[in-house]
Amino acid sequence: MSAPTSRPVAPATAPSAKAVLLARNGVAVTFTLNGLAVGSWFSRVPAVREALDLSAGRLGLLLLAMSVGALLAMPTAGLLAQRLGAARTVTLATGVVAAGLTVAGLGATMTGSFAVVAVGLVAFGYGSGACDVAMNVEGAAVERRLGRTIMPRFHAGWSLGSVAGAALGAGAARFDVAVGAHLVAVAVVVLAGTVLAARTYLPQGIDSTGDPADATPAARRRAQLAAWREPRTLLIGLFVLVAAFTEGAANDWLAVAFIDGRDLSEAAGAAVFAVFVVGMTVGRTVGTVALDRWGRVPVLSGTIGLAVVGAGLAVLAGSGPVAVVGVALWGLGASLGFPVGMSAAADDEAHAAVRVSVVAVIGYTAFLGGPPLLGLLGDEVGTLRALLVVPLLLLPTLLLVPVLRPPHAVSSATKN
């Protein structure tokens, strides 16, 4: 059996078992509420498009604003988490998320201004990106103190929150609730819930980022730059980039590809996407057991193989039911790459915040470049066949999996 994927690391004053469990629950709530905010926004995109009377091209530019905001946050989020601690960073970042949602929602319904909505989305993306880094750092700290893998379950909570947000958005649309009123209500709930959840985070004596309280800003900046020169951190980032692309390709294009390529109705296309989300959620929920039993390398190698087979079947299968089975396998296979990559980036607690920030910057470029890449390819070969890029990228990624092995496991293997 491989070495476990995580290990407890005691800070200067180790938190009690009760405090760790409370922090675990708080991190789970944070992930879920962040997913709720994102799912709520995307569920109202059709209404925003109608309110602003946008063409497909203009809508694409508007949605790009959120990705730009997230990418702007990533380089500084690690430094912010080191300086303020994960709890305060998550609280402040969620305040920005709430403000962005409010501006975007009210901008669509009250001003009808493209620019106002775009500004709101940049803020929303910035806050969500900063929160993403900080909550992953805190999640990794909790995972170490529990002594078992739990990060994928936090990400499963994010998935469930996004599904809940989409369901609430569908209900709001069904009953003609204005976009502004809906998103303002979501912003209030998300902010209030996150503020309460962050109060349960680990003590900050030597905070959950592992950064000494007296570290100078110059020292933090040097640590950030140093992380960009670390081969392991960069290779983990490359792995997370492909993992994010594998997940994002399905999020953005799966329903459309099945509608166009397999002549399904919109409702059936949405159902196919739901199969993918269920596969992701199941994989993130039960995958923690497999990771603790067999370790990162064999489990990730196996799940990547599942994603390759699943995506291939989804595109190439001659039978509709077989293609749907492929979608389920794709979801299962794509479930662990992103969260385990974040855990690997945070293996060394003393440098967790800056390394998670670097990996997030690299990984999130998939969400920025993936949609237009697949869109252009889809114009040439069709949206369904364009998805074959996913297994073609995943196969060489198998060579990167050993990089995610925990450093202490490498040391133990060397000694043996």
Image (cartoon, rainbow, N blue to C red):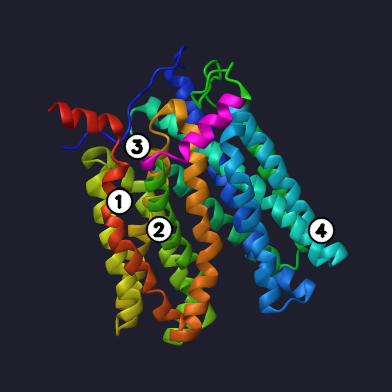
Q: Give the numbered dot on residue 368.
A: none
Q: Quadrant of residue 162?
A: bottom right
- Tell me the element at label 1: helix
Kindly check if marks 3 and 1 are in contact, taking CB atoms under 8 A apart as contact.
no
Rounded to the nearest angstrom, the CA distance separating label 1 from label 4 is 45 Å
For the record, the magenta segment spans 218-232
Rounded to the nearest angstrom, the CA distance separating label 2 from label 4 is 36 Å
Rounded to the nearest angstrom, the CA distance separating label 2 from label 3 is 22 Å
Mark 1: amino acid: Leu
User: Where's residue 67, x and y in %?
Assistant: 61, 57
Residue 264 in view, yes or no: no
Q: Label 3: few (<14), some or many (≥20) within 10 Å? A: many
- Tell me the element at label 2: helix
In this view, the residue in front, 334 or 194, is 334
Q: Give the numbered dot on residue 242.
A: 2
Mark 3: amino acid: Thr
Q: Earlier in the sequence, mark 1 or mark 4?
A: 4
Rounded to the nearest angstrom, the CA distance separating label 3 from label 1 is 20 Å
Residue where numbered disc 3 is placed:
149
Mark 4: amino acid: Leu
Magenta stretch: helix, strand or loop mostly:
helix
185 over 118 or under it: above or below: above
Q: Label 1: few (<14), some or many (≥20) within 10 Å? A: some
In-image side of 99 versus 257 (left or right): right
Q: Give the numbered dot on residue 400.
A: 1
- Tell me the element at label 4: helix
Q: Label 2: few (<14), some or many (≥20) within 10 Å? A: many
In-image side of 304 versus 91 (left or right): left
